[in-house]
Image: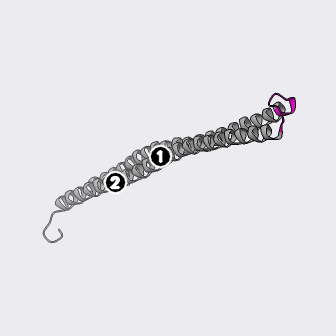
Amino acid sequence: MLFGLSPLFLGVVSLVAQGVGTMMQVQAQKQALAYQQMQAKLQERQYQQQAEAAELEARQRAEERRNEYFNNLSTNRALMAQSGITLDSPSYRAFLEANYDTYRKDIGVINLEGLEKKLSAYYDVQQARLQQRANEQQYKTNVNTTLGRNLLRASDTFGEL
């Protein structure tokens, strides 16, 4: 007997302490999961905003290119009229068609670049969601491991009683 305490009492105290320690470990793991989930959700939100920003940027660039095309078209028509070239001439039509083709290609490239950035950001959103699921699975695994390990220790302690 240690300090007049029975081994049975000390064993029960040890089991209670192990139980409290186990609960504290599980609570700490739960808190760590909550922080990881908050971080993953924040990343997801940031990636969503990047996707929206990429779409908006592509629209703005397309609008700027559209305005530039129409400004150039007006300028070219005015210059052609001043120079005495008729607007129905084959060379003028070819010139306008070439400008229009360039404009259409530019718009296509701008839209593709915007789509690429948007899809990349959505891919990152998906990765953040997968990370959230992985965090949850890791939490479950860690809790089960902690509980199993501490149950084995408690079993050893109980066996010594």
| Amino acid, disc 1 | Glu
Labels 1 and 2 touching (C-beta < 8 A): no
Q: Secondary structure at mark 1?
A: helix
Is residue 18 one of those drawn in magenta? Answer: no
| Magenta region, main secondary structure | loop
Q: Left or right: where does residue 34 sit relative to residue 47?
A: left
**Quick one: label 1, few (<14), some, or many (20+) residues within 10 Å?**
many
Q: Residue at x 51, y 42 (%)?
A: 52
Q: Height in image: 73 above or below 31? A: above
- In this picture, which residue range is highlighted in magenta? 84-92
**Toward the viewer: 82 or 127?**
82
| Image coordinates for residue 93, horizontal then vertical, percent | 82, 30
| Image coordinates for residue 23, horizontal then vertical, percent | 28, 53
Is residue 89 one of those drawn in magenta? Answer: yes
**Toward the viewer: 86 or 53?**
86
Query: How many numbered tags mark residues here?
Result: 2
| Amino acid, disc 2 | Gln
The CA distance from mark 1 to mark 2 is 20 Å
Q: Residue lying farthest left?
A: 4
Location of residue 28 (image quadrant):
bottom left
Q: Which mark is residue 44?
A: 1
The C terminus lies in which quarter of the figure? bottom left
Judging by the rendered image, the residue that carries numbered circle 2 is: 31
